[in-house]
Image (spheres, rainbow, N blue to C red):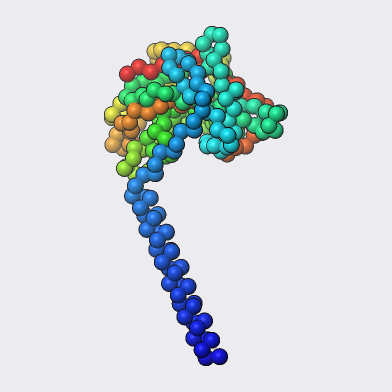
Amino acid sequence: MKKTFIFLFLVLVLSACQKEKQSLTAKSKAQSAEAEPAAAAPRIKTNATIYWSGYTWNVKAPAGTAGPGPNYWNPNYVWVDGNGWLHLKVAYNTATGRWECAEISSTTNFGFGTYQWKIDGPIANLNKNIVLGLFDYSGIDGRDEIDIEFARWGNDAWPNLNYTIFPKVGDPATPASYSQNFTTPGGTYTTHRFKRTASSVVFKSLYGFQDGDTNLFLTKTFTSPATSISSKSMPVLLNLWCYNGLAPSNGQPVEIVIHEFKFTP
């Protein structure tokens, strides 16, 4: 009996030591992960491309779910019409029995300059579970990204226009953001842009299709060093998707038309 007790005691001691070793290893890995940025998320490959606004774009078409959301993505929910306008759609696919979304990413990388989109659609009245994103993105979540997003993030009481800047790798991980509610009393045409320089990002939103500042209804400026601004050249992405993968609460499909994307160095 005494031998059995001693044996069990030794087993417990060894087991405890092993668990402590595993815990320390996990802690070390976590600290290493904090010290070094995560690798860029691999681009989801697809053979589908479109040509729009003078650039070639990859159409997102993974086999299963993928972020943001996560969601299912349908390449048929992206198309360019005879006028040269881009269409993005979120809809219920009766063939698959699921809601599916749309995203494109440029094959060209863009750096400092002005990014502008001319949009036709009910973006001020999107369902609380729908997000329209216009942004540049390095591929590392939470880093080197500048966003204009039309979304209420699942809550009807929240503002629907969001400007966000995610810091460059190596700086504190806190993003800078500004949100405000807006309406479109004059119709569904709006223009949205941001100008990125080494020292600032200036966001602007305007009624109608504008290349100047006529009918400006919102602007916000972020400056460094208070805001960490990426210096990377990155692809531009446009996506229309379901927040947290949730179907529109009203059960209705959504289609947005983007007449033009323009980049001015």
Give how far across and how far down residue 68 sits, in percent.
Answer: 52, 36
The residue lying toward the viewer, choosing from 203 and 130, is 130
Q: Position of residue 181 (x, y in %)?
A: 52, 28
**Quarter that holds the N terminus:** bottom right
Seen at 39% across and 22% down, the residue is: 108
Q: Position of residue 189 (x, y in %)?
A: 53, 15
Query: On the rendered structure, is 249 left or right of 162?
Result: right
Res 122 quadrant in image: top right
Tell me which residue sits at (67%, 29%) in the image: 92
Measured from the top left, where is residue 31 in percent x and y?
A: 36, 54
Q: Quadrant of the C terminus?
A: top left
Q: Is residue 228 visible?
A: yes
Give the number of marks.
0
Residue at 46% from the left image edge and 33% from the top image edge:
43
Q: Is residue 102 left or right of residue 33?
A: right
The answer to whether one can see residue 223 in this image is: no
Q: Quadrant of residue 63?
A: top right
Residue 231: quarter of image: top left
What residue do we see at 64% from left, 32% from top?
Answer: 99
- Going by the image, does 40 lie left or right of 246? left
The one nearer the camera, 232 or 173, is 232
Farthest-out residue, top: 83
